[in-house]
Structure formats: C-alpha cells, structure tokens
Image (spheres, rainbow, N blue to C red):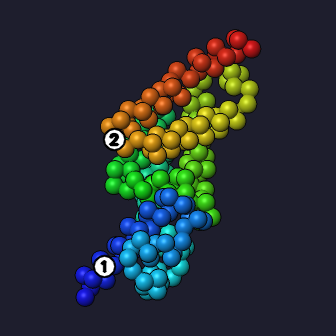
C-alpha cells in the first residue's frame, strides 16, 4: 500500500514538473497536473495542500542546495575567476540531476517565493565583481560607475539561463559557460582601459 502511495505521489511530481516548466507557476493548473498524472483532482490534495505547497515541495531542496553552495563559494579564499568556475560547476551538477527544477527556478517561478532567484544570484555575482575584481584594478578611475558590474552580472546570469534552456548535452553546456566566462570577464581591466582611451 505504501508503494502505491509513493507511486501516485511520484506521478503527481512528474506531471507537476512538466506543467510548471511549460506554463510557469502562475499559469500552471492543479487540474491539468491531475489529468496528466492520470489521477482524480482530489487525489492531488491528499498529498499537497495547494499549488503553492506542491511547487515549494518540488523546488525547495534544489533552491537551498544552489544557495548554500553559492554562499560557501563566495566566502572561499580563491580568486574571482575560480569562484565563477566553481559556481558554474555547481550549477552544472544540479542541472545534471534536476534540470527541470533548475529551469523552473530560473525562468518560471514568477509569483512564487522563489521568483527572485536570478536577482539574488546577480546580486551575489555583483558583489564578487565589485568587491574582488574591481578592488584588484591598479587604476580605480577606469570605472566611473561600478553599476557596470551589475549590468555585467545580469548579462552573465541571463546568458547561463539561455544556455541551460536551449542545450541538453552536459559537456556542451560546460564549454559554452566557460566561453561565456571568458568573454565576460577575461582580462577585464585591460578592456576597461581600452574603453577609457576610446572615450
């Protein structure tokens, strides 16, 4: 009997992941999830109080894993480039096991308690760039407005999301994110110098 209960719960979760990935938190319907899981609508409510409870149950662990890992990486005593690579590696590890959950968190969680995930990651990256990359610049006057690092952070995280939602092969994803890191941050001080000379 317990096996049957777990099997039904798993069918709900599988159907819910597909529904949330396709329609997002706000557009998803418990009725559709029940139908796609081939169970009665009332059965869903035996396992989950409501849509919010179902969404949180599916995504909470992945969200926490990602943020605990990122916060640990941020406080490590390694150079900023290595931090970016470690963050990339953690995202890839999570993506291998929980690709749907990660894509939902990144792009389909509006209206839920996770809707600010990308903003939170951008803020973390911005702090790395502002405090650690900019602080290593020999000539601080090259950066007239540190807000440019926020723009770089936003563009970088959007780039990662685009790669994750359009690619399926893990090795290719890793290579593309490595290229994105290189294009975004390699020799960044020299590039700021070049910009300041051209202005």
Residue at 61% of width from left, 30% of height from top? 134
Q: What is the secondary structure assignment of the residue under circle 2? A: loop
Relative to 152, is 119 above or below?
A: below
Q: Secondary structure at mark 1?
A: helix
Q: Does residue 193 show up?
A: yes
Q: Which mark is residue 6?
A: 1
Identity of the residue furthest to the top in this view: 197
Q: Check contact, mark 2 vs mark 1: CB within 8 A.
A: no
Q: Position of residue 29 (x, y in %)?
A: 54, 71
Residue at left offset 42%, top offset 83% = 40
The first of marks 2 and 1 along the sequence is 1
Say whether residue 135 is visible: no
For the residue pair 115 and 80, the one nearer the viewer reads as 115
- Relative depth, front residue between 62 and 58: 58
Q: Is residue 179 above or below residue 119?
A: above
Q: Does residue 82 appear to the left or right of 5 in the view shown?
A: right
Identify the disc placed on residue 169: 2
Residue that appears at 33% across and 42% down = 170
How far across and how far down the image is residue 64, in percent? Answer: 46, 61
**Mark 2 vs mark 1, CA separation in Å:** 30 Å
Q: Quadrant of the C terminus?
A: top right
Q: Which residue does the image show at 39% across and 80% down from the upper left?
A: 39
- The numbered disc on residue 123 is none
């Amino acid at each position: 009997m317990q096996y049957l209960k777990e099997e039904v719960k798993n069918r709900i979760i599988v159907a819910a992941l597909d529904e949330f990935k396709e329609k997002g938190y706000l557009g998803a319907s418990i009725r559709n999830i029940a139908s796609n899981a081939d169970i009665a609508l009332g059965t869903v409510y035996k396992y989950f109080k409501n849509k919010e409870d179902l969404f949180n149950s599916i995504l909470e662990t992945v969200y926490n894993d990602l943020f605990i890992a990122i916060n640990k990486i941020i406080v490590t005593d390694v150079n900023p480039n290595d931090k970016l690579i470690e963050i990339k590696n953690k995202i890839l590890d999570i993506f291998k096991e929980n690709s749907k959950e990660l894509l939902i968190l990144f792009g389909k969680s509006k209206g839920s308690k996770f809707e600010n995930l990308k903003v939170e990651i951008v803020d973390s990256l911005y702090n790395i760039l502002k405090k650690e990359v900019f602080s290593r610049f020999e000539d601080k006057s090259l950066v007239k407005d540190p807000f440019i690092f926020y723009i770089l952070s936003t563009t970088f995280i959007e780039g990662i999301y685009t790669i994750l939602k359009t690619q399926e092969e893990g090795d290719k994803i890793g290579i593309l994110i490595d290229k994105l890191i290189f294009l975004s941050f390699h020799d960044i001080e020299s590039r700021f110098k070049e910009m300041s000379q051209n202005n």
